[in-house]
Amino acid sequence: MKHYMKLIIFLILSTIFIANGFSRHRIVIMTDFPPADVIPGGLGFGPADKRSDSDDVQSMVRFLLYSNCFEVEGLVATSATFANVANKQNIFDILYLYDHVYENLYRHNQLYPSADKLRSVTWQGNSGTWGRPASEIIGQGRDSEASEKIIDLLEQEDQRPIWFSIWGGSCDLAQALWKIRETLTPAEANELLKKIRIYMIGLQDGSGQWMLDTFPELFIIMSAGNYMGMFNNAPGADITLSDLDWINRNIRKGHGLLGIIYPESGFYPETPGVWEGDSPSFLYLVSAFKGINDSERPDQESWGGKFIQPEATKNHWFDDPAGSQTVSKWRKQVQEDFAFRANWMLP
């Protein structure tokens, strides 16, 4: 009965939001996505193309269960694994598993996008960018399928903001911005830049800092440490809501193929459980969809943390001094909602 009440409330709130002119956020996920059978990098062995940080697979499972809350405009494969390779086939592989639970999800909410729809907006980023300076990965001759598609997306007549949820390298977005600046008039470029909203997890290459330095007017949330509130061992958080036992009971076992693929750990297999450091970048928008925060106000508390704006002349936001606790304080609500949605995968 409790789960049915939550579903009814969710549907009522969705109806109210739509009736009052609210819409789902448009989103592009940029992920250093490894193979679905990723070998946690901390093991120290295995083929380079399979060794990586498995937390992106964890985050993608969660994101797909929330994909009905968004208009998913793009899934970008950026450089990943110890081989430093971007491979969109890795995303296709997890969408194959999503397809196996899609009908069950669709029965609960008809806003879930089909696997074919998501495949159609899955784009290839550039390989070999991890850890390299901006001067080596942005500029003439460095376009990618992803950077070109991002420009096409921004040039659509739809004036609603587009959120770029950056889990991995940001160079394909930065390349798109470089080309926009180089090929359009300042007025034309500004019209496109006004649509962009960025929530960036860390800095995996030089392009993130390049965007911060080059575009003071660009809306950027830079999470350098708040995201660690998602980690299983976040200070002060209830570990029983994110340890392996919880994950096995609520996600991995008895929840179809998409649940099974959720990795037991992140980078270090000796510390199993939730290590979804990238998830705050979209949970920030999920809590906004639920009416907890305003996505245009990073200084408000949210499932994705809380941020401050050090310089009024720059539209850049950085970690609130409270740190990871701005994320971990919501663990009970976040995990209960995750488990609730995971049950939708069941027949």
Image (tube, rainbow, N blue to C red):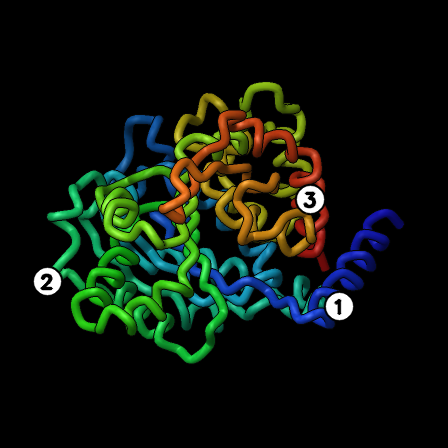
Q: Of 248 and 201, which appears nearest the observer?
A: 201
Q: Is residue 13 left or right of residue 261?
A: right
At x 43% / y 41%, what residue is drawn? 317
Mark 1 touching mark 3, by CB under 8 A? no
Q: Real-space Cα distance between discs 2 and 1?
A: 47 Å
Residue 52 circle label: none
Inspect this view and state whether residue 309 appears: yes
Q: Position of residue 55 (x, y in %)?
A: 44, 39
N-terminal-most mark, 1 or 3 = 1
**Image quadrant of residue 330?**
top right
Q: Is residue 338 left or right of residue 323?
A: right
Q: How many marks?
A: 3
N-terminal-most mark, 2 or 3 = 2
Q: Nearer the viewer, mark 2 or mark 3?
A: 2
Residue position for label 1: 15
Q: Position of residue 292 (x, y in %)?
A: 68, 47
Inspect this view and state whether residue 254 appears: no
Q: Position of residue 72 (x, y in %)?
A: 49, 65
Q: Badge 1, how many Cα within 10 Å: few under 14, some, many 20+?
A: few
Q: Badge 2, how many Cα within 10 Å: few under 14, some, many 20+?
A: few
**Image quadrant of residue 268?**
top left
In terms of secondary structure, where does tag 2 sit? Answer: loop
Q: Is residue 328 above or below residue 345?
A: above
Residue position for label 2: 140
Amino acid type at image mark 2: Gln
Mark 2 touching mark 3, by CB under 8 A? no
Residue 339 circle label: 3
At x 30% / y 58%, what residue is drawn? 173
Q: Is residue 79 above or below residue 274?
A: below
Amino acid type at image mark 1: Thr
At x 62% / y 52%, what residue is drawn? 288
Q: Position of residue 43 (x, y in %)?
A: 34, 26
